[in-house]
Image (cartoon, helix red, strand yellow):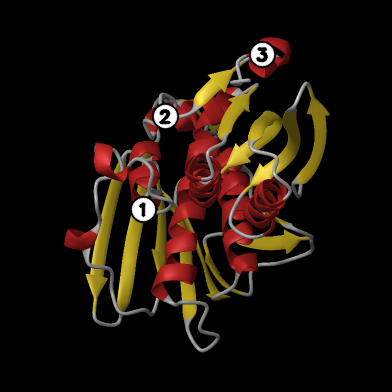
Amino acid sequence: MACSLGKKHGRGGEYGTVGSRAIAVGQEPVAMNHKRVSFTLDSTLETVNSAEATASNLATEAGFADDEVMKIAMAVREAAINAVLHGNAYDPAKKVLLEFERTSGKFVITIRDQGKGIDLTAIPDPLAPENLLKTSGRGIFLIRSFMDEVEINPSAVGTEIKLIKHVHGPAVGGKEASQ
Amino acid sequence: MTMKSNTRQVDGVTIVDLSGRITLGEGSVILRDTVRDLISKGNKKILLNLGDVNYIDSSGIGELVSAFTTVRSQGGELKLLNLTKKVHDLLQITKLYTVFDVKDDEASAVKSFSR
């Protein structure tokens, strides 16, 4: 399935997309000490898949190990599902903002929707015995499981979730070792 | 990679060989439709072979739970076979590993269904 990541607003480097895989071009990872890129996306299933693929590519470029890349990509997928499905409810008039920021110590992904704002007190514990057989409600739990820090900021004009993965170790061969 | 589903019968048990991703959208829908179709045809002993499923998201997990409870409510049994490490780890952290009856050998899994 061919898809790309809509409007992009890059700072500190150029990102582009090819086919179903978003790729980063223009700068080597060693030059990625501080780099930010953001996308404005439609509220579609394609956005969920593209966000995941882009997260995977950028996390790989940032030097994370394969299992960490998988966790980051999955957390971004779950956050994108929440934004598209629960936040914007597939409303074509509402957009999803997706931003990746790479600093020397952190890889930060911000996802913002234009929904009514999630009620954090209404999210049940998916590990509670009475909730184990529920068919939904595991997204935020998985996000918290896979990332080092998670900030969720709901408001009347949407929910912003910030996913943070720490980068550990010195630069080695143009890449930085991750946990 | 989209999900593919193939069913076969072994000693009264329906084995569903799944491959690809069980995720929001097509993958979850294929799994749901497959299980509903089997139940409607009276096939209530179902073994989901996840050996070639390399990725499941929260929607896919929900679909597995839904399949499990749907089959059980119809008096049947649904078991899982050949989990990949990723899927195994996901079921562990969501505490679903002990909810599902998970098998790693097809022949013994088939025999484990009630007669």
Instruction: State which quarter of the image contains the C terminus of chain A.
Output: top left
| For marks 2 and 3 on the same chain, the one whose residue lies earlier in the sequence | 2
Q: Amino acid at mark 1?
A: Gly
For this rendering, which residue is in front, A116 or A146? A116
Circle 2 residues within 10 Å: few <14, some 14–19, many ≥20? few
The local secondary structure at tag 3 comes to helix
| Residue A29 spot, x, y in % from top left | 59, 41
Location of mark 1 (residue)? A137
Q: Amino acid at mark 2?
A: Val
The disc label shown at residue A17, or none: none
Task: Please report, as a chain letter, where disc 1 is located.
Answer: A
Q: Amino acid at mark 3?
A: Lys
Residue at 47% x, 84% y is A94
The local secondary structure at tag 2 comes to loop
Co-location on one chain, circles 1 and 3: no
Location of mark 2 (residue)? B99
